[in-house]
Image (cartoon, rainbow, N blue to C red):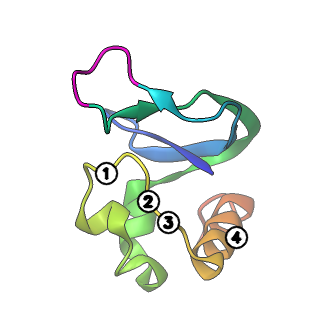
Amino acid sequence: MLYYHTGKERAIVGEMRVATAPTTDPKSDDPKSVVVKVEPVQRWDPPVTLVQIKADPVFADWELLRISRLSVMPVTAKQWQRLEEICRSGGKKD
């Protein structure tokens, strides 16, 4: 899973994994609302910014750009690979 910072940074800053099974959210009255604990796997340095993602046609139909309020969304293998390429290149165009 990817960890995306919202707010001022707006960037993918690393990878994470689910550490616990889903449980009902104790802060919500909605029985469908669940929470999971996550733990870091790897920090991405440099982060991949929203500007970089928007500029790349590989992500044109990605939910991050279309429905930005989603907390969880799928990432295709092609998208993941491209994000890693952008990170490794330091954001420079290929």
- Front residue (pair 79, 1): 1
- Residue 57 location, x and y as percent? 42, 85
Q: Which residue is mark 3?
A: 74
User: In the rendered structure, are the residues bearing label 4 and label 3 in contact, judged by CB atoms less than 8 Å apart?
Assistant: no
Q: Which residue is mark 4?
A: 85
In this rendering, is residue 2 above or below 53?
A: above
Report the mark closest to the observer, 1 or 4.
1
**Crowd band around label 1 with a 10 angstrom C-alpha radius: few (<14), some (14–19), many (20+):** few
Residue located beneath label 1 in the image: 70
3D distance between C-alphas at marks 1 and 2 = 7 Å
Q: At label 1, which amino acid type do we have?
A: Leu
Residue 27 image offset from top left, x and y in percent: 31, 14
Question: 40 or 57, which lies in front?
Answer: 40
Q: Which mark is residue 73?
A: 2
Q: Earlier in the sequence, mark 4 or mark 3?
A: 3
Identified by mark 3, the residue type is Pro
Label 4 to label 3, Cα distance in Å? 18 Å
Quarter holding residue 36: top right
Q: State the CA–CA distance, disc 2 to disc 4.
A: 20 Å
Look at the image and give the residue range highlighted in magenta: 25-30
Q: Amino acid at mark 4?
A: Glu
